[in-house]
Every structure is written in structure tokens, then in C-alpha cells.
Image (cartoon, rainbow, N blue to C red):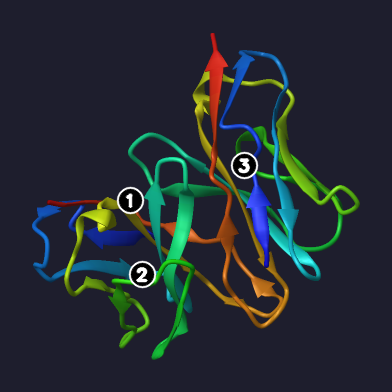
Amino acid sequence: AQSVAQPEDQVNVAEGNPLTVKCTYSVSGNPYLFWYVQYPNRGLQFLLKYITGDNLVKGSYGFEAEFNKSQTSFHLKKPSALVSDSALYFCAVRALNRDDKIIFGKGTRLHILP
Amino acid sequence: EAQVTQNPRYLITVTGKKLTVTCSQNMNHEYMSWYRQDPGLGLRQIYYSMNVEVTDKGDVPEGYKVSRKEKRNFPLILESPSPNQTSLYFCASSLSYSGSRVNEQFFGPGTRLTVL
């Protein structure tokens, strides 16, 4: 069965420092991987996705993520955090097969400290 | 404006009283889905639809029904709501979601449901 793990419930980073939000996955076959962000009282917004190709994926708001097949990870990164990046972040995975379910992680709350 | 709309945004009801949460998208998307979000559990998929008249169960379908009679609408029906269905519900749509054609999902603003 496919699964996604976000091992940290919360991540605190000082403004201006680099940030990483971790995601590992388990899926049979090739994965499709996504990151979404949720601001307070809002629906989820798409940040970036990995389908095939370059392992480093660039997305919205200066975020990027690196696909690592050997470690089955897809960590979200940003070189310099902003206070406005404070939000809830979700990693999601879907396997390339006939089952079209998508599995979301439990979310990581990111706090950027001024 | 391209968007997914849900109604109502907030609903308080009582156990057993049938309710429907509507979802509509104006992007001509094939794929639509319903999720519930609960603290500590993240997002869990309830039902999804690959296209008109095609629906399938997600991970937590018990107690819910859906229909997809038109491409733009995907209502969520709770025939006999119970307190354990108190949650934040999101509808989402995607251009396509089959095989290798995988697109990101657009989410509605959410419906906060309380069942007393």
C-alpha cells in the first residue's frame, strides 16, 4: 500500500535562514509527488510537483523540492525563509498504476520566526 | 475567475438529518474529489470521480455518498450524519488524473461541518 510520512509535526525556522520540510513516501512503481500549502482558513494551494525528469523541481514562492529515489524522499526547501511562509504544508503521492487514489501526509506546520 | 466553490461554508446540524454539500468547478476539469481534514490525521480522501458518471471510493467513504451527473458538479451527501463526521471538508478538481496525465488539484475554500 502506498503511504506518505511527514516526520515533523512542526518546524521552526528563523527568518532569512534556509528551511526544509521533510517527506518520505512508499509506493509501488514510479511515484507522482506533490507539495501543497494551506494558509489559515483557506483551501490547499499547489506548490510544485514531480512527475519525471530533473530531480530538483522548482515551484511557487521560491520553493523547490528534491526527488531522491534511493531514499524515497521528496523534501521541500527554500534558501531564505520569510515570515509569510508560515503555514501548513502537505506532501502527497500517487502511484503510476490503475489505482488513482492520492495519499496525503499529515502535514507539517512551519513557523518562521521574525 | 477559475475556481472551485463549495456551499455552505459553515454548517451545524443534528445527528440523522440528511445534508448535502455542493461543489462546483468552472475549469472543465475531468477529475473531482472530496477530502476531510482532521487534526493529526491530515487530509483523507472520501470519494473521487474521474469523469461524469464515474465515481470511486477513497480511503474513508463510509457514511458518505456522491454523484457526478454533470462535469462541473460533485455534491457530497451525508444521508444520516453522525458526530464522528464533524470535520473540515474540501472539494478539489484537476484537469485530468489518469495514467501519465497527472495534474495538480485545485481546492475549494472548505466547509466546516459540526454534527451535534
User: In which quarter of the view is residue A114 placed?
Assistant: top right
Q: Please rate how many residues cluster around mark 3, counting C-alpha atoms within 10 Å: few if below 14, some from 14 to 19, many from 20.
A: few
Name the residue nearer the viewer: B5 or B2.
Answer: B5
Residue in the picture at 72% in, 53% down: A25
User: Which mark, residue A30?
Assistant: none
Q: Please rate how many residues cluster around mark 1, counting C-alpha atoms within 10 Å: few if below 14, some from 14 to 19, many from 20.
A: many
Secondary-structure class at tag 3: helix
Residue B74 locus on image (x, y percent): 32, 75
| Residue, disc 1 | B109
Asked if labels 2 and 1 touch by Cβ distance under 8 angstroms, the answer is no
With A21 as the anchor, is B50 left or right in this view? left
Direction top: furthest residue: A114
| Residue, disc 3 | A60
Q: Find the distance from the CA under tag 1 to the CA under tag 2.
A: 15 Å
Residue B16 locus on image (x, y percent): 11, 67
Q: Is residue B93 above or below residue A3?
A: below
Q: Amino acid at mark 2?
A: Asn
| Residue, disc 2 | B26
Q: Chain of mark 2?
A: B
Q: Which callout, 1 or 2, points at the residue further toward the start of the chain?
A: 2
User: In which quarter of the view is residue A110 placed?
Assistant: top right
Q: Amino acid at mark 3?
A: Ser
Q: Are marks 3 and 2 on the same chain?
A: no
Residue A99 locus on image (x, y percent): 62, 78
Q: Find the distance from the CA under tag 3 to the CA under tag 2.
A: 23 Å
Name the residue nearer the viewer: A51 or A7.
Answer: A7
Residue in the picture at 61% in, 13% down: A15
Q: Chain of mark 3?
A: A
